[in-house]
Image (cartoon, helix red, strand yellow):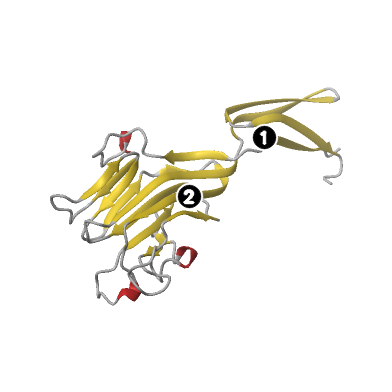
Amino acid sequence: TFVLLIFCITAVDAQLTVWEENFDSYLNGTTTGNAGRWTSVCGACITGDFFEVRNGVFSGNDVNDFSTWESEIIDISNYSGLSFSLDAIEVGDHEGPGCGCGVNIDYFDVYYSVDGGPFTVIEDWNGDGAVGHTLTGDSQNGINTDADWGSTTITESGFSGLSLVIRVVIRNTAGSETLNLDTVIVQAASTLPLTWRQFDGTIKGNVVDLNWETASEVNVSHFEIQKSLNAI
């Protein structure tokens, strides 16, 4: 007699936070996260400029050229329904493609890489960016006196893999211009609920004795065992 055993695991539905950084725990002037959670580079900053934590946000003022904030390698291997979000906050007026100011254009660009692959840029967020750029100054009406995007939450979803890196690149070139990054969150709709250590079954007369052991469980409510005589 053929018997098919179907082993079902029911997980508790929840929106899970996989990784988060809100910068609230750092002193002003911090440029590297605790235990290497993130790093930053401002290669063109001079005296008076800054690219660092200030007042609970990561802030870039007059950085002069592209400056980079980057997360550590984030483990996403046990999750599904992944997404990430971050806040992009503008202080002052920034120049964009319509300003007629040549190369003096300001950007707030968000990139991500999955499994060590090439970085993908999120383009033209909410119509406030451009091809190849997430957000730019003065994108709405082509003049350099508008409010630009002000404050927005950028989100990305639909990716999966073993690891994720988030990168933010900004450029501004005046002491009146500041771009802030805050509340970086990676979330999952659910977790792959457990990791098996071993599973086996032994026939004992008219019954089958099943034994299993797990190495880890996350949000698992119960186990359900089903059987079939015809594999249907």
Numbered label attached to residue 12: 1
Residue found at x 47% / y 44%? 185
Residue underneath mark 2: 85
Question: Quick check: 173 above or below 12?
Answer: below
Mark 1 vs mark 2, foreground winner is 2
Name which quarter of the figure residue 104 lies in: bottom left
Q: Amino acid at mark 1?
A: Val
Numbered label attached to residue 51: none
Secondary structure beneath disc 1?
loop
Kindly give the residue lying farthest to the front in the view shown.
Answer: 145
Q: Nearer the viewer, residue 122 or 9?
A: 122
Q: Nearer the viewer, residue 34 or 197?
A: 34
The quadrant of the rendering that contains the N terminus is top right
Question: Quick check: 107 above or below 43?
Answer: below
Name which quarter of the figure residue 105 lies in: bottom left
Name the spot of residue 9 as percent of width and height, x first.
Answer: 70, 35
Name the spot of residue 220 as percent of width and height, x first.
Answer: 65, 31
Name which quarter of the figure residue 135 lies in: bottom left
Q: Indicate left or right for 13 with 225 as reference.
A: left
Residue found at x 35% / y 39%? 56
